[in-house]
Amino acid sequence: MKSSITRRRFLETTSFAGAGLSLSLPQFAFAAESAADKPAKLGGKPLCAGFPKWPVFDQTEEKALLDTLHSGEWFRGGGGAVKGFEEAYQKLTGAKHCLATASGTAALTTVLGALDIGPGDEVLIPPYTFVATYNVVVLNYALPVFVDTDLESFQMDANKVEAAIRKETRIILPVHIGGSPVNLDKILDVGQKHAIPVVEDACQAHLAEWRGRKVGTWGLAGCFSFQASKNLNSGEGGAVLTNDAKLAEVCYNFHNQGRARQVSGYNFSYSGTRGSNLRLSEFQGNLLVAQMTRVIEQTQRRTENANYLTEMLSAIPGIKPAKLYEGVTRSAYHLYMFRYDKSQFAGMARSKFLDALSAEGVPCSGGYSVMNKDDYVSGLAKNKHFLKVYGEQRMKDWLEQNQNCPQNERLCQEGVWFTQNMLLGPRTQMEQIAEAIRRIQKHATELARA
Ligand SMILES: *Cc1c(COP(=O)(O)O)cnc(C)c1O
């Protein structure tokens, strides 16, 4: 330990001296340069530090929370904050109706409940998603059917949707993963052809646009999450967007214990739908109104930085940023996603690449693991309720079909993610990320052995 510190100090000193002496002492300068260039994982100095923290807040949020506290109206029944947020979010997205919910999961649950999805129904979902997309289907005892991933875009492969449709299929539920839109043209076409509604899981895609129009407003409904990690955040929270007035009303009733909006006289009125309590609180509503003062500027900054990063990373052999479809006019960049090809990095495993990149001060992850083959999902084939509803043969076929998402498996091995807050910093931080990856590539042979 002691000797390595001494050695590093020595190298730092020589590196400093070497800068001025490089002409007269070329050999010495070369040694100094390679020391300065040493990957952090092998004892060099990390290239990056201090990515922006998340969440972002100041007195605006403080005031919003205190206003609600002092108003004494803490739930949506009496106050105006949730309603105010719904109006603002509806305007921002251009949707006709917005309903705030307790979470993104609650938003999806509300739409599935309003559409009366239940036992015997099938819902098409991608396997490359947060597990909530799967859970909301299964909790209704409907069968989630996986459509393989498009390796290049990380999205549900629109070309494989039609083949998964059966007479039991009730909803197509694509996810705009990472905040980048799926191929909506193709998916909406297939839905229309088979008269199956498309519900967008837009939980990661605030303000993302397809052909100039916000995602979440293209399908019959779109669902958003305001959980703490998301681009618009109230700790927990969610929303449903729809242009269908009738669906909006049923969604409201569902999220409010099946009770209709108008409560007349001294009696509660029941609407005839099932329901639960999936309401957002006034504290969260007002916090969202405050956070919305920042969301447009933050979204623009992410886009600029992500585009710059893509330009730089595309030039590095073996780094393939997720492709955006031709119809994408804006990605929300909830995640910055790319594929790592180890053959361009001396065969170094992705886990070692992630280690080396983290050591450079760049927080990163390998993203989702293979959901369709996970025991959590496979176990459904043995669930007594599912066996009763679908029968042994259907569950056996279902299990077999789940084994057949080869592109998704490959993506789960190659994917690398950065989180949205990293895109809120200055351009120089994007340059540092690219520099860190180039440095790792240059020293890949040593790093692979380490
Ligand atoms: C976050 C997320 C959800 C669930 O949202 P919560 O607010 O955490 O319940 C659903 N789908 C996707 C794709 C998500 O990223």
Image (spheres, grey):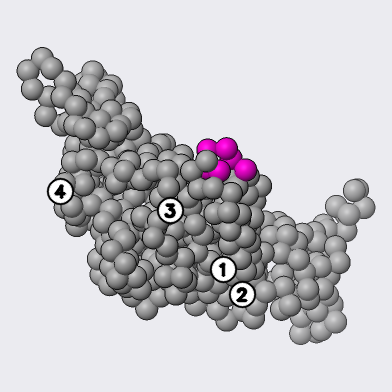
For residue 123, what is the image quadrant?
bottom left
Q: Earlier in the sequence, mark 1 or mark 4?
A: 4
The reply to whether callout 2 and callout 1 are in contact (CB within 8 Å) is yes
Structural distance between the alpha carbons of marks 2 and 4: 45 Å
Crowd around label 4: few <14 · some 14–19 · many ≥20 (10 Å): few
Q: Which mark is residue 338?
A: 1
Mark 2 or mark 3, earlier in chain: 3
Q: Please report whichever mark, 2 or 4, sits nearer to the chain's N-terminal start.
A: 4
Cα–Cα gap, marks 3 and 1: 31 Å
Q: Is residue 161 above or below residue 56?
A: below
Q: Amino acid at mark 1?
A: Phe
3 or 4: mark nearer the eye: 3
Q: Secondary structure at mark 3?
A: strand
Q: Earlier in the sequence, mark 3 or mark 4?
A: 3
| Element under disc 2 | strand
Residue 245 badge? 4
Which of the two labelled residues, at mark 2 and mark 1, occupies the earlier sequence position?
Answer: 2
> Given the image, on which type of amino acid does mark 3 rest?
Glu
Q: Tell me the CA gap for discs 2 and 3.
A: 37 Å
Q: Residue at x 83, y 58 (%)?
A: 8
Q: Label 2 belongs to which residue?
A: 319
Mark 2 or mark 3, which is nearer to you? 3
Q: Position of residue 133 (x, y in %)?
A: 46, 49
Q: Which residue is mark 3?
A: 122
From the image, state whether disc 1 or disc 4 is nearer to you.
4
Q: Earlier in the sequence, mark 3 or mark 1?
A: 3
Q: Main secondary structure of the magenta part?
A: helix
State which region is magenta: 382-387
Q: Is residue 315 visible?
A: yes
